[in-house]
Amino acid sequence: MTDQSPVLLIGASGMIGSAIMSILPLHGYKVRVFEREGGASVPLTSSTHEVVRGNILTGEGLDTAVKGTQAVLYFAGTSVPATSGDDPGIEFKASLPPVTNVLNALVRHNPHARFFFPSTGGAIYGSCDSAPRESSPTHPLSAYALGKALAEQTIRFYNDVFNIRSDILRISNVYGNARPRTVPQGVIDHFLDDAVRGVTSQVWGSLEVQRDYIFTDDVAHAVLALLKATRRSSSIYNVGQSESHSLRQVLSLIGQVTEGQHRFELVKDQYQGVARSSIDCSLLRSAVGWQPAVSLEEGIALAWQRKKALISK
């Protein structure tokens, strides 16, 4: 039996947020959605508790949104590696104020609610020869990774000073959304979107760049497992497949599922991130029993089916 107080979801229309939104009601959770004033509305279901509108950049509406909730799932998208580039100022302006606004609202009105934050499971560690654990040193090499590291430190500060319990999820490269990607992040979804449109994909850097990819539904189930395990101290968890695949392998699998519809070209003067990333997710498995259920081959095939089903509607 779940706590009957609602879960606040910030970023319900995003890739991970929408996956979380789809599974929480199935497990007895009421969902309160925070929407940007004037933005697109999230379709409501009978299990949606309510919608609160406001602005996380200014803090408007957050006091109302956090009251009476058992947890705050912060999955708002503010920046991505490519848009941050080498300018940390973008991160300072776009990413840190919304996080502190939500945390301050919790301090004022609901300090017992748990705070969930999606960090990065690749860029924050830098390029590693072995799969880093949560205890491994961080080595951000981009403004995006630096922004995530600073956000993590901010969240730890609120835990230490104000006792805001938190779960930081260092998530690897997520994919699997039916809707077209609107930001320059997530190569698998972008490549599949290009195949749907008949557009040639641009591949940044080398085909040997390796990443740890995780299907979006698996991330949502990791959040669900952590929500259910309520009696825990604040923690950091890696969320990924714990294995890496090269872009060459990804492109081969995409070529198979699209039956040759996908075309690509190499562009060598664009930001490609760290050369290799793979993370050790054994801590999350031992803590709550979570492990990914969808392999890369299965996930790419399922993502392709979702995108084709969307355009056929």
Image: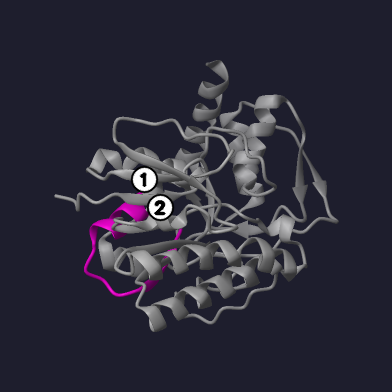
Mark 1 vs 2: CB contact within 8 A:
yes
Q: Which residues are magenta?
A: 221-240
Q: Check residue 65 in the rendering and tell me which mark sits there, or answer none.
A: 2
Q: Position of residue 284 (x, y in %)?
A: 34, 65
Numbered marks: total: 2
Q: Decide: is 22 above or below 65.
A: above
- Element type where label 2 sits in the image: helix
Q: Decide: is 155 above or below 31.
A: below
Q: Which of the pair 312/205 is nearer the observer? A: 312
- The answer to whether residue 296 shows anywhere in this view is no
Give me the residue at 45% from left, 67% from top: 103
Instruction: Please identify, in this view, whether the residue under mark 1 or under mark 2 is nearer the observer.
Output: 2
Q: Of the residues shown, which amino acid type is indicated by label 2? A: Ala
Q: Residues within 10 Å of mark 1 (few under 14, many from 20)?
A: many
Q: Of the residues shown, which amino acid type is indicated by label 1? A: Arg
- 232 falls in the magenta region: yes
Residues under labels 1 and 2: Cα distance?
A: 8 Å
Residue at the farthest right position: 269
- The answer to whether residue 153 shows anywhere in this view is yes
Q: Can you tell which quarter of the image residue 274 is in?
A: bottom right
Give me the residue at 36% from left, 47% from top: 293
Q: Which of the pair 172/76 is nearer the observer? A: 76
Q: Position of residue 70 (x, y in %)?
A: 28, 58
Q: Is residue 114 left or right of residue 245?
A: left
Give me the residue at 62% from left, 59% from top: 210
- 205 falls in the magenta region: no
Q: Which residue is mark 1?
A: 32
